[in-house]
Amino acid sequence: MQGSLISPPLHLATVSLGSNLGDRLAYLDGAVRSLLEDRRNRLRRISSVYETEPYGVKDQEWFFNRVIQVETSLGVRAFFRNLQKIESSYHRVRARKWGPRTLDLDLLFFDDLILDEPDLRLPHPGVPQRRFVLEPLCEIDPGLIHPLLGRTMQDLLADLQDDSRVIRRPERSSRP
C-alpha cells in the first residue's frame, strides 16, 4: 500500500515589522524575503510601509513599519524562533526597551492562539494600544478578531487613544 501525502495544517501568522536605524526600507524588505526563503511560509498579505513616531522612547529616529500575514506550516514556537533568527541576522540589539533598532519583528497573532509564557505572549499585548500596528493591520485585515477582546482590528483602531503620527508612504518600495 502506498503512503499518502498529507499536507501539514496551515496557520496564519500576523507579524509587525519595524526599523529606525540604517536603511529602514531595505531591512523591512529583507526581513520579508528572509521569512519567505523557508518554503513552509507563504505571504498572504502585506501592508504599505508607514512612517511612524517612536513609541515609548521619543528621542530617536522615526520608524518604518508594516504588517504582514504569512500562511505557515510551522508551529508557533518554530515560527517565533525564525523571527528571532532574522532579527539577529540584521544585528538587532536589545539595549533599551523601546530603543532604536535595525529590525523588530513582533508576532502579533498566530491563528487565534492564546499563549502567556515568559518569552512569548499571544496575542501580542501591545496590539490594542499601538497605532503603528493597528493602521497597517487594518489596511490588510480590518475584520481580524482579537481572540481575547472579541473585537475587530477596525473597532480597536476606531477607539484608540494613541494620537501618535502615522504616515502611509507612497508605494515606491518593491514588494518582496
Image (tube, rainbow, N blue to C red):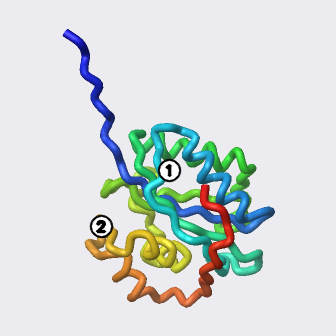
| Disc 1 crowd, CA 10 A, few/some/many (<14, 14-19, 20+) | few
Total marks in image: 2
Q: Which mark is residue 148?
A: 2
Q: Position of residue 20 (x, y in %)?
A: 73, 68
Amino acid on which the number 2 mark rests in the picture: Leu
Check the image and report above or below for 38 versus 137: above
Measuring from the top left, give residue 10's x and y in whole percent: 34, 44
Residue visible at 63% across and 65% down?
A: 18
Q: Residue furthest top?
A: 1
Q: Nearer the viewer, mark 1 or mark 2?
A: 2
Identify the image quadrant of residue 174: bottom right
Vertical placement of residue 136 versus 159, above or below = above
In the displayed structure image, the side of residue 135 where residue 171 appears, left or right? right
Residue 119 is tagged as 1
Q: In what quadrant of the picture does the N terminus appear?
A: top left
Residue found at x 47% / y 89%: 161
Q: Are marks 1 and 2 in contact (CB under 8 Å)?
A: no
Which quarter of the image is occupied by the C terminus? bottom right
Q: Quadrant of residue 132?
A: bottom right
Give the secondary structure at mark 2.
loop
